[in-house]
Image: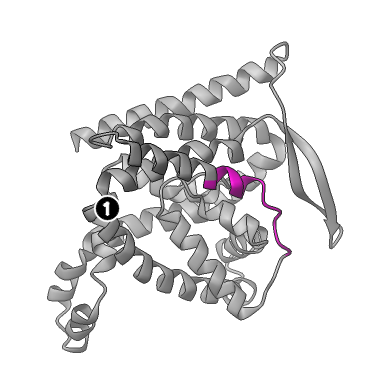
Amino acid sequence: MGAANVVPGVSGGTIAFITGIYQRLLDSLKAFDVRALRMLMKMDIGGFAKHVDLGFLISLGLGVLASIVTLAKILKDAYASSPVLVDAFFFGLILASIFSVGKMVKKWRPFEIVALLLGCGIAVWLAFLEPAAENKNLGYLMVCGAAGMCSMIIPGISGSFILLLMGNYKLIILNAVNDLRALKFAESLPILIPVGIGAVLGLVVLSRVLSWLFKKYHDTAVALITGFVAGSLVIIWPWKSIAESVVIDGKVKVIAWHRELPDLMLANTWVAVAWLVGGIALIAVTEKLASKG
């Protein structure tokens, strides 16, 4: 999930969904309620840990955090040198996820088909929005945290891509996270603390809404998510060129892409296709391991 959330266009929620931990994650997050607060006030640590499934959250959280911290630097360098290969790998991952998520719909009815098309339409619409300018305002950073974290747990909606649209992907994911990795607390914490507060508040609210939706309208919710996943393929399409860009603080910022078909005569195209197949294979292996677990 951490690896997926670092890449714009890829959703950690999709990974949670196909590995079978999504409902448990929602239930665990939803358990942070008044009862949990009372247990903490009474110092009933054991009861609190059981109520919120703390062991599960700690294991998952440490894995996500470690992955984000380590992969932020790796992916920054990878995007700089081979953006097509990185996008191709995650394109394959998302493509395979469509079938993994879609087959969880127990019965396809007209309402589920409408939900599928709606989800796909929303994801494609997001792909063509223009990113906002970078903003370090405290309140805006909290909103970024809430929006980014909420979209991280919605399969098919990429938290990183939402941050990209809000203009703060570079500020938060690339700069602040890498500063934290380098132990530059003075530079990283003023950014990451308000983002973290917003993320926690967003999770508390959204986890309750999503848990209710999945229990009451399971097939419709899964169909909508399948649409999100399918539509997000537009965002991560590997073969594209810059259509429009601006220079901000001496650096080129892409605000629109021109998507194109790959040149099959180039060797690099087939290398990218190999990485794409690798992404598909990874989902197949992940799904198989999840079924055994």
Q: Residue at x 47, y 76 (%)?
A: 197
**Disc 1 target residue:** 214
Asked if 11 appears above or below 137 in the picture, the reply is above
Render colour scheme? one colour
Residue at point 60%, 71% (across, down): 188
Lateral position of residue 10 relative to residue 40, left or right: right
- Near mark 1 (Cα within 10 A), the count class, few <14, some 14-19 or many ≥20, is some
Residue 122 in percent (x, y) is at 53, 47
In front here: 149 or 258? 258
Q: Position of residue 164 (x, y in %)?
A: 63, 55
Which residue is pictured at 66% across the width and 44% down the height? 77
Is 126 contained in the magenta span? yes
From the viewer's side, name the closer residue of 263 and 282: 263
- Picture layout, residue 86 above or below residue 185: above
Q: Amino acid at mark 1?
A: Phe
Where is residue 73? Give x, y as percent.
Answer: 60, 50
| Quadrant of residue 190 within the rendered picture | bottom right
Question: Residue 99 appears at what percent x and percent y?
Answer: 37, 30
The C terminus: image quadrant: top left
* In this rendering, position of residue 160 left or right of residue 43: right
Is the residue 43 above or below the residue 179 in the image? Answer: below
Q: Which segment did they paint magenta?
A: 122-133
Under circle 1, the secondary element is helix
Q: Is residue 236 left or right of residue 264?
A: left
Does the stretch in magenta take in 2? no
